[in-house]
Amino acid sequence: MMENQSLEWKRQWRDDFLKGLSGLANAQGGVLEIGRNDAGIVVGIDNAKELLEELPNTIRHALGIVPSVELLTEQGKQYIVVSVDASSTPVSFHGRHYLRSGSTTQELTGSELDNFILRRLGKTWDSIIVPKITVTDLDTSAFRKFREKSLASERLQKVDLEMSDEALLDSLLLIENGELTRAAILLFHNNPEKYVFGAFVKVGYFESGADLIYEDEFHGPLIAMPDEIVDTIYRKYFKGIISYEGLQRIANYPVPLPALREAILNAIVHRDYTTGIPIQIKVFPNCVIVYNDGRLPENWTVANLLKKHRSRPYNPKIAYAFYRAGYIETWGRGIERITTACKDAGKPEPLFEASSSEISVTFYTDTYTDTDVGVKNDVKNGVGVNETQKAILLLMRETPTISAQRIADIIGITKRRIESNIHSLKKAGIIKRLGSDKTGHWIVNYTETWEQGVERGATAYKDENKPEPLSGASPSEMSVTLYTDTYIDTYTDTDVGVKNGVNETQKAILFLMRETPTISAQRIANATGIMKWQIESNIRSLKKAGIIKRVGSNKTGHWVVNYTETR
């Protein structure tokens, strides 16, 4: 037996273990056994009788719950078993709320705490009312779109749709005590971002990890958004291979339309709208990734998601409106439909990933397999190592203890692709890992040839419209001359400095800091689609110019912005 979601072992009792008991009560309930070591072996306790008398009162006074406390004996050694039931109301310890997740106890803060308390009170985030907004403030074209979709899907009858907009909202359970809910605003307001920051979708095309070629943003009522997003992606971002069966024209796209459409609908319906981070869809030459700030149901993993399951929408009211519009089902088959659509079209199976704050689905196109990242040629001379692998090698040299997840965050591609590249580099003998995944480090055995370095530098200069550098080599010396117009063209923090006004990236940073003063550099990077180190460099320049300052610590402080754009 091992520690798990509902079982924890401790050698001796300490009062800070009340935190763990509150976490069990806030989850599914469970047991704390005092007198066992980390391996689950009974080691006994000396003050068992004293604890048997004191613990019930200690727990009741600290947590407001009544536990079951038992004294048991195993192989002549006494131990205490404390059992707590799942609580129907939130349980706090010293004003803080905890939740048992797996074999650990996590503190709930921010939006996680808000949602936890709301759900324990029988509420959801999208059911909270937004005062002083009336039906006349909503977008009539959004109501028209809903009626058209509902009628076409036969989820509502024509007679149902002849009711007033207010009666329609009431029938969709989007009005509470005469006030509109957050769901109503998101679904039918022409500018929901006025009330819910970040309620939009970004789509971008990337040639490689961080090279954004072009992008689109989709704003407005959620109910009208899916069709516009899907149409734009297939018209602008995808190239279809045309074939014919008899006289019928068939277009074969990188991702089957039903699969991507379902992924986008899932992202909109199940998103955590409290984070302020828009849904992001990144299109690469070899894959498409849909990122969504959200979380799986309590105690779920991706494995649960891939199994047959009941529908458990994160935003039930938004989901109900999307169901009535004919966009989705309510049977929990969204993931199954995505996977089936890919299989039916002969496409690779998509990859689903989930963390504590983000869910993503990656669609691999026909051009991508694990062998695409292989090191096939003469690695001794640096031939065959692709640009992603060069970036990985550079980061490993700079930080030998770096993890695959950290490399993925910096480069801007999925952890799975980083791990696939690392596997190829290991197989080619270019890198090896010494020690464990947690405490070990990387050894890199790779040198780029002189010619390759010169060629890469020349390409970079050409891309920046700079004079072509002059390279030279003799038996004893190698040199490169970089020609400049009026300044040295190397990157320093001053390149993003505030010299002739605030640049567009810095304006975006200032806007986000005004909207959310506690926002972190990572959140700004996620919202803008720019690398975190570039955001941090711009922040340093803004600080140096006196335009912003940080009050308090990185974790609990906030930004103060002193900037007004001139007209």
Image (tube, rainbow, N blue to C red):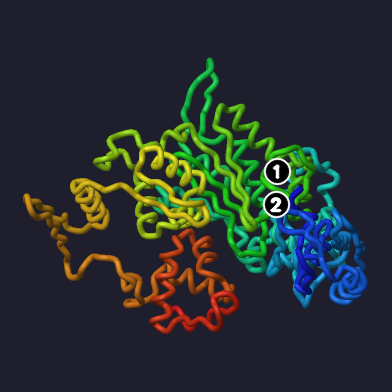
Q: Is residue 565 left or right of residue 131?
A: left
Q: What element carries label 1?
A: helix
Q: Position of residue 374 (x, y in %)?
A: 39, 36
Q: Can residue 224 be spotted in the picture?
A: yes
Which residue is at the far front?
76
Q: Is residue 30 left or right of residue 538?
A: right
User: Considering only order in the chain, which callout, 1 or 2, is on the residue closer to the N terminus?
Assistant: 2
Q: Position of residue 153 (x, y in %)?
A: 75, 38
Pick the front one: 555 or 324: 555
Image-quadrant location for residue 21? bottom right
Looking at numbered disc 1 in the image, what kind of residue is underneath it? Leu
Q: Residue 296 carries which label?
A: 2
Q: Are the residues tagged 2 and 1 within 8 Å (C-beta)? A: yes
Q: Where is residue 206 in the image (x, y as percent from the top left)?
A: 43, 48
Pick the front one: 504 or 224: 504
Looking at numbered disc 2 in the image, what kind of residue is underneath it? Leu
Tell me the residue at 43%/33% (across/down): 371
Give the CA separation, mark 2 to mark 1. 8 Å
Q: In this view, does 317 lie to the left or right of 528?
A: right
Q: Can residue 132 be spotted in the picture?
A: no
Q: Is residue 219 left or right of residue 46?
A: left
Q: Mark 1 points at which residue?
A: 305
Tell me the residue at 75%/69% (across/down): 133
